[in-house]
Image: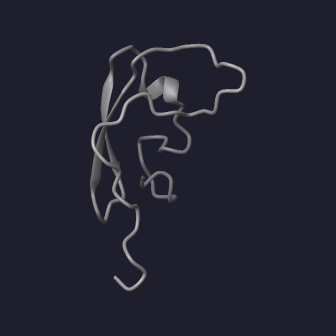
């Protein structure tokens, strides 16, 4: 995150790191932190690599467990 906002870092940052570099082997997992304020945690796993299919929308979610929370609360919160 800090590399993406211009701070000095030894890492490339999220915006400049290719997904193939982060997930370099099948079954590799990563804990993904979304929204640093609310701290939503997701486990992301590379299940396989396939060629893209014509007419298919990407990216797509292969599996989801539980209900998705609303991203932002009510406007008056």
Residue nearer the viewer, 28 or 22 = 28
Q: How has the structure been colored for display?
A: one colour
How far across and down, in percent of the image, does residue 12 sit? Answer: 49, 41
Q: Name the residue at the front extreme.
A: 67
Which residue is at 39% across, 18% downward? 47
x, y percent for residue 65? 29, 37
Which quarter of the rendered picture does the C terminus lie within?
bottom left
* Residue at 31%, 26% in the rendered image: 29
Q: Nearer the viewer, residue 41 or 61?
A: 61
Residue 46 or residue 12, whichever sits in front: 46
Q: Residue 63 or 16: which is nearer the viewer?
A: 63
For this view, does 58 lie left or right of residue 41? right
Q: Is residue 18 left or right of residue 72?
A: right
Instruction: Residue at the far bottom: name it.
Output: 76
Q: Is residue 40 above or below residue 62?
A: below
Image spot of residue 34 (x, y percent)? 36, 52
Q: Residue at x 31, y 48 (%)?
A: 67
Q: Where, by quadrant of the figure, is residue 64 drawn? A: top left
Marks counted in the figure total 0
Residue at (43%, 41%) from the top-left corner? 11
The image position of residue 71, as x and y in percent, is 40, 61
From the viewer's perspective, is residue 39 above or below residue 73?
A: above
């Amino acid at each position: 995150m800090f590399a993406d906002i211009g701070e000095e870092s030894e890492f490339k940052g999220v915006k400049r790191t290719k997904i193939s570099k982060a997930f370099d082997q099948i079954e590799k997992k990563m804990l993904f932190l979304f929204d640093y304020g609310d701290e939503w945690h997701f486990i992301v796993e590379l299940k396989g690599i396939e060629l893209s299919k014509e007419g298919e929308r990407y990216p797509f979610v292969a599996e989801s467990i539980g209900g998705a929370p609303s991203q932002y609360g009510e406007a008056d919160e």
